[in-house]
Amino acid sequence: MSLNILAVDDSKTMRSMITMALKPSGFDVHLADDGIHGLEVLEGLSPDAIITDINMPRMDGFGFIDAVRAQEKHRATPILVLTTESSTELKMRAREAGATGWIVKPFDPEKLVKALHMVAG
């Protein structure tokens, strides 16, 4: 069974890397370039998991997580934060907003696949 993933990141390179990491493992990857765009893409989607960056223009990852969690149908959707940030304070803030997990960039593709299977599989 293939898993539906929404990946939200303002870096085109990062979106490509996520796609290259997940496609060979059979994931269906949907992309958005910031939190606002992520919410637009999410409207027509029921993802098994969401990956989001924190630092993005227009709407950052915290705002995006809050907006996703405010929607009844996405209250339980796993959200993994994929970011260069690693401070305990930001991790706590993300968890309080409703993030399921935290992965620091640069990421190991195998670990990302494993993490997604753990939270969504």
Image: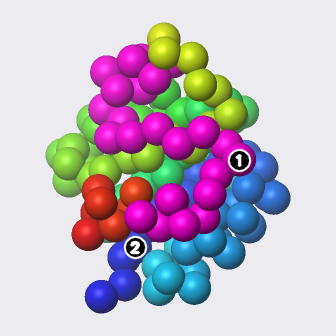
Tag 2 secondary structure: strand
Q: Visible in this render: residue 37?
A: no
* Mark linked to residue 28: none
Q: What residue type is labelled 2?
A: Asn
In the picture, measured across the screen, residue 85 lies left or right of residue 43, that is right
Residue at mark 2 to residue at mark 1: CA–CA distance:
22 Å
Task: Identify residue for label 2.
Answer: 4
Residue at the farthest right position: 13
In the picture, measured across the screen, residue 7 lies left or right of residue 68, that is right
Q: Nearer the viewer, residue 33 or 115?
A: 115
Q: Which colour scheme is used?
A: rainbow
Q: Where is residue 113 in the image (x, y as percent from the top left)?
A: 47, 67
Tag 1 secondary structure: loop
What residue is drawn where x is 39% and y is 18%? 92
Task: Identify residue for label 1.
Answer: 106
Q: Nearer the viewer, residue 7 or 33?
A: 7
Magenta range: 90-114
Q: What residue type is labelled 1?
A: Pro
What residue is drawn where x is 68% and y is 75%? 20
In the picture, measured across the screen, residue 58 lies left or right of residue 12, that is left
Q: Position of residue 50 (x, y in %)?
A: 43, 54
Q: Badge 1 local density, few (<14 within 10 Å), some, or many (20+)?
A: few
Give the image quarter of residue 61.
top right
Q: Which of 105 and 70 is in front in this view?
A: 105
Q: Visible in this render: residue 119?
A: yes
Q: Which of 114 and 2 is in front in this view?
A: 114
Ranked by sequence position, the earlier of labels 2 and 1 is: 2
Q: Is residue 75 magenta?
A: no
Q: Badge 2 local density, few (<14 within 10 Å), some, or many (20+)?
A: some
What residue is drawn where x is 30% and y is 88%? 1
